[in-house]
Amino acid sequence: EKQKLKRLRTTVAATLDGTVVELYANIELPQDVDQVKENGATGVGLFRSEFLFLNRDSLPDEEEQFEAYRTVARKMRGMPVTVRTFDLGADKNLDHAKRVAANPALGLRAIRLSLAEPQMFNIQLRAILRASRYGQIRILVPMLSNVAEITQTLHLIQSAKQSLRNEKIPFDEKVQVGGMIEIPAAALSLDIFMRKLDFLSIGTNDLIQYTLAIDRADDTVAHLYDSLHPAVLRLVAHVIRSANRASIPVSVCGEIAGDVVFTRLLLGFGLRVFSMHPVQLLTVKREVLRANLPDLIPITQKILKTADPEKIHALLAKLNA
Ligand code: PEP
Ligand code: MG
């Protein structure tokens, strides 16, 4: 079984009707890249850079971060490497964090923390930019909730670029900047985000948490964390459809992207880029190879029209039969 899957490593992920799909991998540390290559990913869709900051006493300096990003860029040999700027706070706290938020998931985390700590952010942006000439690095901004956060981030990226130019340090001038869509407010005001961003990545783990008001780290409400809630499905489908219409590349990098229960559903919604844990990649690829889009689309459209959980489950079973 495992041997059979391994044989799919170099097979192009295309549906029966010939639609090519990109299967990217999520990583936490540079050493994860070996597994990414073993499983034949066509890119890194999410490098959770905050893992470079965790379980230590001091912050990683520019040089250490540069080396980490460069290692991944080099090993991926020109394939996209999406570095998410640090998503610290909430469930991933710095050991020496000064502030303890009353409600960390709604507090100073991710891009909010980056904008509140511009020096720390600038070090990371310089490190990412410096690494960008060793491969195809893209910058991904987590937890956007309003457009001012993008404007400020783009401004800080411009300043980091200018400082590198002044120091005659080379970098890729065309490095792309994308945003994570993981707060319902961003999903529902997508047009303004799309005007400023080169690509989008849907973080369904947080999108589900914030849409349903279910703390993803709280076991007592885990049974209410429902990836198939109609509100979640409609938000995800809306983001994919809007991005496709605007010709803005869009991926899903939350857990559902690596779960074969969702593969056909997401294909039917129009998703063509999936990013997941590397060990899930070949099973998802097998599912893509077996899928036929003309059969899927009518059922996925029906799923979006019903709010009845039982009907959703029945239609999903039919879709996956
Ligand atoms: C997400 O929220 O879906 C996501 C991919 O990011 P993380 O799980 O790191 O919050
Ligand atoms: Mg997230």
Image (spheres, grey):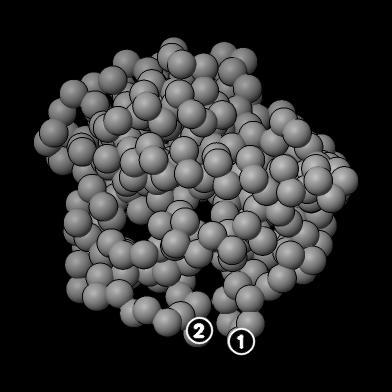
In this image, 93 relative to 184: left or right? right
Amino acid beneath label 1:
Asp
Tell me the residue at 32%/27% (across/down): 238
Q: Is residue 57 above or below residue 9?
A: below
**Mark 2 vs ligand 1: CB below 8 Å:** no
Tell me the element at label 1: loop
Reading the image, the residue beneath label 2 is 95
In this image, 227 relative to 122: left or right? left
Say if residue 273 shows up in the picture.
yes
The foreground one among 233 and 44 is: 44
| Location of residue 113 in the rendering, given as x and y in whole percent from the top left corner | 44, 62
Tell me the residue at 57%/51% (across/down): 84
Reading the image, the residue beneath label 1 is 57
CB of mark 2 within 8 Å of CB of mark 1? yes
In this image, 80 relative to 290: left or right? right
Amino acid beneath label 2:
Asp
In this image, 103 relative to 147: left or right? left
The CA distance from mark 2 to mark 1 is 7 Å
Tell me the residue at 16%/41% (across/down): 309
Q: Is residue 64 above or below residue 75?
A: below
Q: In terms of sequence position, does the residue under pointer 2 or pointer 1 come before the other?
A: 1
Q: Is residue 304 above or below residue 92?
A: above
**Mark 1 vs ligand 1: CB below 8 Å:** no
Say if residue 279 shows up in the picture.
no
The foreground one among 83 and 290 is: 83
Tell me the element at label 2: loop
Give the position of the C terminus as an image quadrant.
top left
